[in-house]
Image (cartoon, rainbow, N blue to C red):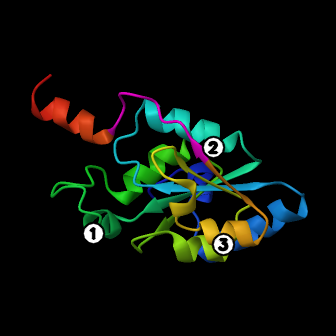
Amino acid sequence: MWLNKKLYNKLQTVEQLKSTLTIVNFRGQKIVFTNGVFDILHTGHVDYLSKARDLGHFLVLGLNTDASVKRLNKGPERPINNEKARATVLGALECVDAIVLFDEETPYELIKAIQPDILVKGSDYAIENIVGYDVVKAKGGEVITIDLSQGFSTTNIIKKISEGK
């Protein structure tokens, strides 16, 4: 096992997550969903995830698999950290309640399966263009954007490293 027990319990299959969310829903708690690659964790990521969690009671993080990152054309060497390593680091964050890997280009099917109350992305997205907008709005949920921390990005970190700065 590559994660300690507490972290391992955060990484769930879709079926496990649906069971977990049944309990969350029964308690009347709001489920927040966001997704991404989160390749090299940085201050911008932590700020974003913390703000997303503050919007509800239970934050589900859809994490791109390594194969889906490759298909996103983020660069030939991406991801830098494999999905297990990324899930381990993200699972250590208190603000992240559950992590589910998804292999598709978008988390649309995952959003349909888990039916979050709140869908969150960065403010670099127009709300109506956020994948899963239609699903969340149809159930009466909210789609919210969060301002991103300026100056922080995995691409910039990789660039600095490659330039020796």
88 horizontally vs 115: left or right: left
Quarter of the image where one finds residue 43: top left
> What residue is disc 2 on?
52
93 horizontally vs 148: left or right: right
Residue 71's tag is 1
Residues in magenta? 145-153
Crowd rating for badge 1 (residues with CA inside 10 Å; few <14, some 14–19, many 20+): few
The answer to whether marks 3 and 1 mark residues whose Cβ atoms lie closer than 8 Å is no
| Magenta segment includes 36 | no
| Magenta segment includes 148 | yes
Can I make out residue 31 in this image? Answer: yes
Between 141 and 128, the one lying in front of the other is 128
> What residue is disc 3 on?
135
Amino acid marked by disc 2: Ala
How much space separates mark 2 and mark 1, taking CA atoms? 26 Å
Coordinates of residue 41 in the picture (x, y in percent): 40, 39
Coordinates of residue 17 in the picture (x, y in percent): 66, 68
Task: Tell me the residue at 52%/66% (across/down).
Answer: 131
What kind of secondary structure does the magenta stretch mostly adopt?
A: loop
Task: Tell me the residue at 51%/62% (across/down).
Answer: 129
Whichever of callouts 3 and 1 sits on the residue coming sooner in the sequence is 1
Task: Tell me the residue at 31%/62% (across/down).
Answer: 69
Crowd rating for badge 2 (residues with CA inside 10 Å; few <14, some 14–19, many 20+): many
10 horizontally vs 106: left or right: right
Quarter of the image where one finds residue 142: bottom right
* Residue at the far top in the pictured view: 165
* Residue at the far left in the pictured view: 163
Judged from the image, the secondary structure of the residue bearing numbered disc 3 is helix
Judged from the image, the secondary structure of the residue bearing numbered disc 1 is helix
Whichever of callouts 2 and 1 sits on the residue coming sooner in the sequence is 2
Coordinates of residue 153 in the picture (x, y in percent): 34, 37
Amino acid marked by disc 1: Arg
